[in-house]
Image: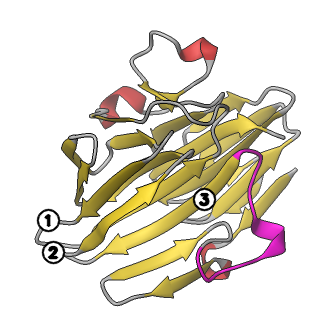
Amino acid sequence: MIDVRPFKTLGGANHGWLKAKHHFSFASYHDDARMNWGRLRVWNDDEIAAGTGFDPHPHRDMEIITYVREGAITHKDSLGNTGRTEAGDVQIMSAGTGVVHSEYNLEPETTKIFQIWIIPDRRGVKPNWGAKTFPKATREAGFEVLASGREQDAGTGALPLNVNGAVLATTLKAGQTLRQPLAEGRAAYLVPAKGAVTVNGQALGARDGAGIVDEPVIEITASEDAELVLVEVAKE
């Protein structure tokens, strides 16, 4: 089953400095049919104006992944971590027992990100933050695991998550096809950061979402050059 969520149907808000679209219920946007997808709780599509950002604020017991689509985001937290993550790269924060962080766009242009929240397997763990560069050339026509807590990804260099799930990315040239297995009991959510694809025959444009369950194989064909982000988690 594939639940396609066109970008134009997403909830959201325009705060001036921040233009946000929500694939799932978040802040003032609420939809009982869009609360989560398995353990995936939040997928926000944010555009952050130059010289602005999120002031220091707390989180706890949530796996928070930031995938930068354009520009860069600068992170600082109460653990003493600082870092700048550029387009195509990813940062993770396991909030655990609690962390206060800020995220600013210190660039001269708008920064565009996907911010993804996954419900952790264990509560009250030690907080953690990390970021990593993932050259796009290494993930053309094949998903690269960017962050993961799955046993199968141990030792791959993926950023660690406190959940049996993973964040993956790939780039496809127009006409290329990619087949990704999805095990029983697992759920996936796919969003093209750029471009357009078909997913098991269903059309998906840039920034549309597709929730996928009970599909043993996800077949993705690019109708134009595309950059894709996929989250795989437990179905329940």
Name the N-terminal-most of marks 2 and 1.
2
Left or right: residue 11 compared with residue 186: left
Judging by the rendered image, the residue that carries numbered circle 3 is 42
Q: Earlier in the sequence, mark 1 or mark 3?
A: 3
Residue at image location 37% in from the left, 63% down from the top: 57
Amino acid type of the residue that numbered disc 3 sits on in the rendered structure = Val
Reply yes or no: does residue 207 show up in magenta: no
Image position of 146 with respect to 29: above or below: above
Q: Is residue 224 visible?
A: no
Residue 113 seen in render: yes
Quadrant position of residue 138: top left
Whole-number angstrom distance, CA of label 2 to CA of label 1: 5 Å
Instruction: Identify the magenta region.
Output: 27-39
For label 1, the crowd category at 10 Å Cα-Cα, with few meaning under 14, some 14 to 19 and many 20 or more, is some
Instruction: Give the image quarter of residue 175.
Output: top right
The residue sitting at 47% across, 43% down in the picture is 95
**Residue 78, image x and y in percent?**
27, 47
Q: CA distance from mark 2 to mark 3?
A: 25 Å
Disc 3 packing (10 Å; few <14; some 14–19; many ≥20): many
Helix, strand or loop at label 3? It is strand
Q: Judge the density around disc 2: few (<14), some (14-19), many (≥20) Cα neighbours within 10 Å.
A: some
For mark 1, what is the residue?
Answer: 106
Cβ–Cβ under 8 Å for marks 2 and 3 = no
Check contact, mark 2 vs mark 1: CB within 8 A: yes
| Vertical relation: 47 (above or below) 118 | below
> Depth check: 89 or 16 in front?
16
**Residue at the spot x=86%, y=28% of the render?**
184
Q: Which amino acid type is shown beneath numbered disc 1?
A: Leu
